[in-house]
Image: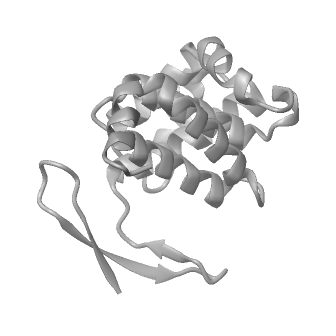
Amino acid sequence: MSDTHNTGDKAPRKTTHKTASNGSTKSAAKSGRSRSREFALQGLYQFLVGQNEAADIDMFTRDLSGFHKSDSVHYDALLYGCIEQREILDALIEPLLDRKFDEISPIEHAVMWMGAYEFQHCIDVPWRVVLNEYIELAKSFGGTDGHKYVNGVLNGLAPKLRTLEVEADRAKGKL
């Protein structure tokens, strides 16, 4: 089975899908940005749980298998940007939470940081793509229903951080 994905100004690419051991479908050809998000998530997890320094996390992560296939510029922006702006990101996210941050999985916390960061700083990525990427990351790496929580929070942030884009979708009847 194959899907065609259009990445904007690039030619559409074909993506093949493989079935994982749990029965879900996995993309065999992830984009460099998708890979960078996975590596940044691993790094932010190390930061939240192990309280490691960003430079140490970065050095470790760059040695991981497959890192060379990622978009290292996007990875750098996510890892360092989320760590540097963690208080700002938490302040954006916190009003949408129904519990304290220490009651949220570090995976979901990091995913929400990354989504909020991309909403603010990666304007070239459509808000719906940001939302989908982070829901999928939460499904892959988070708890059983963590993706639903991430979805609710990021859906609450999108109209605040991508006001014009979300309103344009509403006007077109896409929401």
x then y, percent, for residue 54:
57, 22
**Residue at the spot 76% in from the left edge and 57% down from the top edge:** 145
Q: On the rendered structure, is 113 left or right of 126?
A: right
Give residue 31's quadrant in the image.
bottom left
Using the image as rendered, state which of residue 29 and residue 136 is in the foreground: 136
x then y, percent, for residue 171:
34, 40
Q: Quadrant of the N terminus?
A: bottom left
Residue 144 against residue 52 in the figure, above or below: below
Using the image as rendered, state which of residue 169 and residue 134 is in the foreground: 169
Using the image as rendered, state which of residue 97 and residue 105 is in the foreground: 97
**Residue at the spot 62% in from the left edge and 60% down from the top edge:** 140
x then y, percent, for residue 121:
39, 23
Using the image as rendered, state which of residue 159 and residue 25 is in the foreground: 159
**Residue at the spot 48% in from the left edge and 50% down from the top edge:** 133
Task: Examine the rendering and report whether any part of residue 63 can be seen.
Answer: no
x then y, percent, for residue 126:
34, 41
Residue 142 against residue 164 in the figure, above or below: below
